[in-house]
Amino acid sequence: VQLQASGGGLVQAGASLRLSCVGSGRTLSRDTTGWFRQAPGKEREFVAAIRWSGGATDYADSVKGRFTISRDNAKNTVYLQMNSLKPEDTAVYYCALKKGSIILSNLRNELAYDYWGQGTLVTVSS
């Protein structure tokens, strides 16, 4: 299983970016996919996730209303649309995959995920 994250870049505050996570070796619609991020000097934190069953989503409070996670089953790709970006959104963003179902309480737990992509850097200037 491989996850390829892309779409990061340098943008100004208020701009938008869309990150993509392409999966190979697994059908993402049958799994739970999450986005996490790690800012310089900080621990990795949960950003958003989409469950395999029904496509239910969950977001960190810090991005709720600004970020949207979605899935294109035909392309085996999960997206993270990021709007109204802030300097505090600067981080390396990782996509992660949990095979099959996941209990709701584990959606935000990085230890629950089985596979990780390589990360893509998002830098937001003020």
Image (spheres, rainbow, N blue to C red):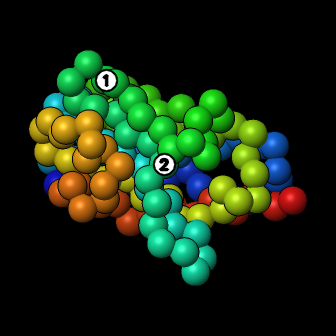
Residue picked out by circle 2 = 47
Residue 71 picture quarter: top left
Count residues near mark 2 (Cα–Cα under 10 Å), then give few for <14, some for 14-19, many for 20+.
many
Amino acid, disc 2: Val
As measured in the structure, the alpha-carbon distance from the residue carrying label 1 to the one carrying label 2 is 16 Å
Residue 27 lies, with reference to residue 97, above or below; the image says: above
Q: Which residue shows up at 48% across the image and 72% down it? A: 43
The disc label shown at residue 55, or none:
1
Q: Which residue shows up at 44% across the image and 53% down it? A: 46
Amino acid, disc 1: Gly
Q: Position of residue 125 (x, y in %)?
A: 81, 61
Residue 15 picture quarter: top right
Q: Which residue shows up at 45% across the image and 42% down it? A: 48
| Residue at the outermost bottom position | 41
Q: Which residue shows up at 24% across the image and 62% down it? A: 111
Count residues near mark 1 (Cα–Cα under 10 Å), then give few for <14, some for 14-19, many for 20+.
some
Image quarter in which the C terminus is found: bottom right
Tell me the SS state at disc 1: loop
Residue 49 picture quarter: top left
Is residue 100 or residue 102 the one in the foreground? 102
**Does residue 14 appear in this view?**
yes
Tell me the SS state at disc 2: strand
**Does residue 27 appear in this view?**
no
Residue 33 lies, with reference to residue 125, above or below; the image says: above
> With 122 as the anchor, is 28 left or right in this view?
left
Q: Position of residue 79 (x, y in %)?
A: 46, 37
Is residue 92 or residue 40 the one in the foreground? 40
